[in-house]
């Protein structure tokens, strides 16, 4: 029997309400032309800037994942392939473009043609192509916000200035398109809300350091990520995360974990296989394995190591967030280091590397990552392959067998007392790449 | 046609272009004791800055079918293009040993991660990642890129214990301006008389330049330009095609030859595009790093890895094809090359709207049999010749 792994409570209802409100506003925009909307990527998003116009973000990634979770992604993917997209293009893009071609939306409501397609390029080159195509196929105006890749030890002054100047250009462009002046005070207020949300979210994430962890920082974190990206800059967002933290703290106080008895703690690397989300989750639940940390939950922002938006310097804060404080724009070795810290500070037994065919940003080089964790650090690692959007790439039996074998081995090691010495890990492989 | 000797010359270039031991680089280093060689992964790198630091810029183009992959598959796995794996394999088998550093830039996610995988496995090698802007329309971009080039220059100076002067930079720019101008002339010559200069010849001549000093390469290009008009080839029954999509991983030489044998006159291509990056000379007046930066933003060829939404590349492809009297476009794409896959969609749409026939072909640099591709090209050519 599969262990119960899901926690349902007030925040789930609140989350649903918040996301529905968001879709309703998009639907309103599509029907009436107001409020203004801005298409943007989740990774390193600058949602605070939009608040300065009362504009609503339109995240194609959220639409794509909703679709996949509901097992509806194949039809739009095939439609996009008919237009010429390759079998090996990122399926997020194909699902989104396919939906556009076929008029499919996650709620059945309407989605607007965005007032501006804002390509907030952080890290993933596919974003640029994706938004170029969205703008071209919809005839919408495009602004390319070029964020330098995080290639130095610390963010450089030149990089920050470059991004700040482009954020200001974005403001000017939006003023022209919307016909309204940018409300700087509201922007600053949004940055302040973000800082509060980030603090609450980080505290939630740090609760997973407890044994047992009160929630799953991969599967459950995804529930919280919607409000995190859509409502981060608003009082409603702050309220949501207050309630969420309270609920989690109450669970910790009661000594309640995800399972009646948590057996394994793992760190997850890579996006989830949304078309088989439930099935995949159950494969871990069977072993009472809880993800105590994940890199995927940091695509939109990496806050658990201390970064907060600074309301006294709102443009710079947004720029810094885009440049250095989201996993997407950080270099590959910084990601290794992030995972290594998770293993140590969140007390994990192993790392699950999920290779996703669509996403080279995440997956290209994960064999080397595995080599680093297993050979250099001696941390048990499991490598799985599937896709985050395309249901054709999920080998259920094989995936289950590999997961079972991994936990069997871990169990064996635990019962025979063979475990990995943290000191050995610390002594060996720390990479000097994180800032 | 006094072909024999001239063809032998091109065979020599083909050998240099595909030589995995980097013998030319080794030779240069032995002639210049203590001097450094800096490799760059495609597509473009500011070679002038490397040159001005007294170093040899070396363009890498993968290993083709000359190297068995033993280590790289385990690191990069499935769904990743070949050049990423062959480059890693070259490093892991000691083939990049003559290089003192390696540069990468913002072309795609796979190459970007490769830079950092190399960094972990070769901690003592100088590896750098250049952010080449994707927003050339922003007034902030010139200053940013100038700063990025200054950062590179400083890193190289530290590595080499040298300093690049503005005069040195200007001299390097002048040399590369000549190099690009000579290549433009050769390309123009081939477009005007494709029966006199075959594509595999032009290609290997150009690619051999990746491994020798620019002065030497300029000399080779001049010699070719002098000799070619004396050739007396006979025009064949061929269609005039533009090749697009091979800007990074390179198609095998035999595949390039095959296209011509199957009835294509190639009137333009994007092979080794970094060597032909600018459409006109980089200005010699003014501050040199600014001139290089400003040229990248405003004077560069269109490319699948350089984003400039002021000038959509799908429109540029149609315009170029018409200007060169191209009859068709062959989209020759490396397997798993995501930028090329994406661009195919808009290229296709635009070509269809313009009524220009096109053919999509996928290749891998490590492939060595091409029967299926041959028959696809032949069928395509026939359909156009007898239309
Ligand atoms: S490649 Fe990865 S990060 Fe980029 S759009 Fe696709 S799924 Fe997202
Ligand atoms: S061939 Fe394409 S995918 Fe591969 S490294 Fe080059 S640009 Fe990237």
Image (spheres, coloured by chain):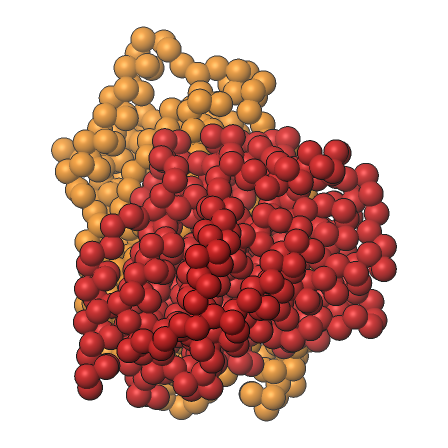
Q: Is residue B9 above or below residue A58?
A: above
Left or right: B377, with A344 as reference point = left
Q: Is residue B302 left or right of residue B136?
A: left
Tell me where residue A353 appears, x and y as whole percent. Answer: 37, 37
Q: Nearer the viewer, residue A106 or B310?
A: B310
Give the quadrant of the N terminus of chain B: bottom left
The percent coordinates of residue A118 (x first, y second) are 52, 73
**Is residue A354 shown left or right of residue A328?**
left
Q: What chain is the orange one?
A: A
Nearest the viewer among B372 and B116 is B372
- Using the image, determine if residue A197 lies above or below residue A399: below
Residue A96 visible = no
Rendering coords of residue B76 (x, y %): 39, 40
Residue A432 seen in render: yes
Nearer to us in this view, A10 or B36: B36
Q: Residue sitting at 33 percent across and 15 percent down?
A: A414
Left or right position of A200 against B85: right
Q: Quadrant of the C terminus of chain B?
A: bottom left
Q: A27 above or below B208?
A: below
Residue drawn at 54 percent across, 52 percent down: B208
- The percent position of residue A262, horizontal first and vertical second, equals 33, 28
Can you name the residue that lies furthest to the front here?
Answer: B2
Q: Colour of chain B?
A: red
Q: Looking at the image, which residue is at 51% across and 27% down?
A: A344
Quarter assignment of residue A98: bottom left
Q: Residue at x 49, y 59 (%)?
A: B6
């Amino acid at each position: 029997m599969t262990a119960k792994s899901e926690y349902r409570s007030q925040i789930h209802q609140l989350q649903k309400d918040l996301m529905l409100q968001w879709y309703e506003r998009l639907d309103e925009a599509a029907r009436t032309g107001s409020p203004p909307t801005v298409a943007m990527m989740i990774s390193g998003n600058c949602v605070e800037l939009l608040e300065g116009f009362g504009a609503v973000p339109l995240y194609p990634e959220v639409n794509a994942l909703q679709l996949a979770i509901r097992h509806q992604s194949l039809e739009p993917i095939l439609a996009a392939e008919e237009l010429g997209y390759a079998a090996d293009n990122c399926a997020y893009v194909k699902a989104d473009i396919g939906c556009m071609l076929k008029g499919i939306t996650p709620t059945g409501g309407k989605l607007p043609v965005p007032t501006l397609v804002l390509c907030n390029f952080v890290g993933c080159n596919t974003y640029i192509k994706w938004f170029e195509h969205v703008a071209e196929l919809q005839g919408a105006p495009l602004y390319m916000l070029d964020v330098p890749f995080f290639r130095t030890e610390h963010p450089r002054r030149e990089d920050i200035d470059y991004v700040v100047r482009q954020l200001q250009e974005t403001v000017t462009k939006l003023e022209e398109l919307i016909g309204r002046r940018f409300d700087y005070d509201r922007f600053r207020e949004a940055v302040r809300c973000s800082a509060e949300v980030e603090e609450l979210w980080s505290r939630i994430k740090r609760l997973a350091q407890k044994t047992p962890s009160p929630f799953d920082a991969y599967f459950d974190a995804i529930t919280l990520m919607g409000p995190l990206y859509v409502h981060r800059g608003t009082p409603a967002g702050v309220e949501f995360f207050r309630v969420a933290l309270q609920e989690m703290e109450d669970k910790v106080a009661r000594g309640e974990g995800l399972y009646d008895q948590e057996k394994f703690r793992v760190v997850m690397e890579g996006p989830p296989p949304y078309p088989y989300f439930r099935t995949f989750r159950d494969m871990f639940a069977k072993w009472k394995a809880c993800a105590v940390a994940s890199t995927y939950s940091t695509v939109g922002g990496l806050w658990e190591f201390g970064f907060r938006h600074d309301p006294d310097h709102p443009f710079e804060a947004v720029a810094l967030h885009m440049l250095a404080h989201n996993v997407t724009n950080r270099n590959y070795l910084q990601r290794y280091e992030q995972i290594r810290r998770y293993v140590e500070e969140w007390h994990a037994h192993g790392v699950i590397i999920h290779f996703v065919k669509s996403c080279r940003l995440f997956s290209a080089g994960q064999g080397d990552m595995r080599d680093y964790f297993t050979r250099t650090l001696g941390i048990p690692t499991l490598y799985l392959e599937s896709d985050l959007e395309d249901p054709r790439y999920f080998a259920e039996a094989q995936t289950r067998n590999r997961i079972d074998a991994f936990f069997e081995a871990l169990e064996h090691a635990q019962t025979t007392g063979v475990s990995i010495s943290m000191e050995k890990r610390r002594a060996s492989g720390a990479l000097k790449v994180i800032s | 046609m006094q072909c024999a000797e001239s063809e032998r010359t091109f065979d020599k270039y083909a050998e240099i272009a595909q030589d995995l031991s980097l013998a030319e680089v080794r030779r240069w280093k032995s002639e210049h004791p203590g001097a450094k060689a800096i490799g760059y992964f495609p597509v473009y790198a500011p070679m002038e800055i490397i040159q001005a630091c007294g170093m040899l810029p070396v363009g890498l183009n993968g290993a083709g079918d000359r190297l068995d992959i033993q280590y790289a598959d385990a690191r990069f796995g499935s769904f990743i293009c070949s050049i990423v794996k062959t480059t890693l394999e070259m490093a892991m088998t000691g083939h990049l040993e003559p290089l003192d550093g390696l540069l990468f830039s913002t072309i795609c996610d796979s190459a970007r991660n490769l830079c950092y995988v190399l960094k972990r496995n070769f901690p003592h090698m100088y590896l750098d990642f250049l952010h080449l802007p994707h927003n050339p329309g922003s007034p902030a971009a010139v200053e940013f890129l100038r700063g990025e080039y200054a950062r590179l220059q400083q890193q190289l100076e530290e590595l080499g214990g040298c300093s690049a002067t503005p005069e040195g930079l200007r001299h390097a720019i002048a040399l590369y301006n000549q190099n690009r101008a000579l290549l433009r002339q050769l390309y123009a010559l081939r477009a005007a008389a494709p029966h006199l200069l075959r594509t595999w010849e032009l290609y290997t001549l150009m690619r051999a330049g990746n491994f020798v000093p620019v002065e030497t390469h300029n000399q080779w290009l001049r010699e070719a330009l002098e000799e070619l008009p004396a050739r007396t080839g006979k025009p064949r029954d061929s269609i005039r095609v533009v090749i697009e999509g091979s800007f990074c991983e390179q198609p095998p030489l035999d595949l390039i030859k095959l296209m011509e044998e199957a009835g294509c006159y190639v009137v333009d291509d994007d092979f080794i595009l970094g060597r032909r990056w600018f459409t006109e000379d980089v200005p010699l007046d003014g501050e040199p790093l600014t001139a290089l930066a400003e040229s990248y933003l405003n004077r560069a060829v269109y490319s699948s890895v350089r984003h400039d939404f002021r000038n959509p590349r799908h429109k540029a492809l149609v315009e170029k094809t018409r200007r060169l009297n191209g009859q068709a476009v062959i989209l020759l794409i490396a397997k798993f090359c995501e930028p090329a896959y994406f661009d195919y969609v808009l290229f296709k749409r635009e070509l269809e709207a313009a009524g220009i026939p096109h053919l999509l072909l996928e290749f891998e640099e490590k492939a060595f049999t091409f029967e299926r591709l041959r028959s696809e090209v032949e069928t395509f050519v026939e359909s156009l010749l007898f239309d």
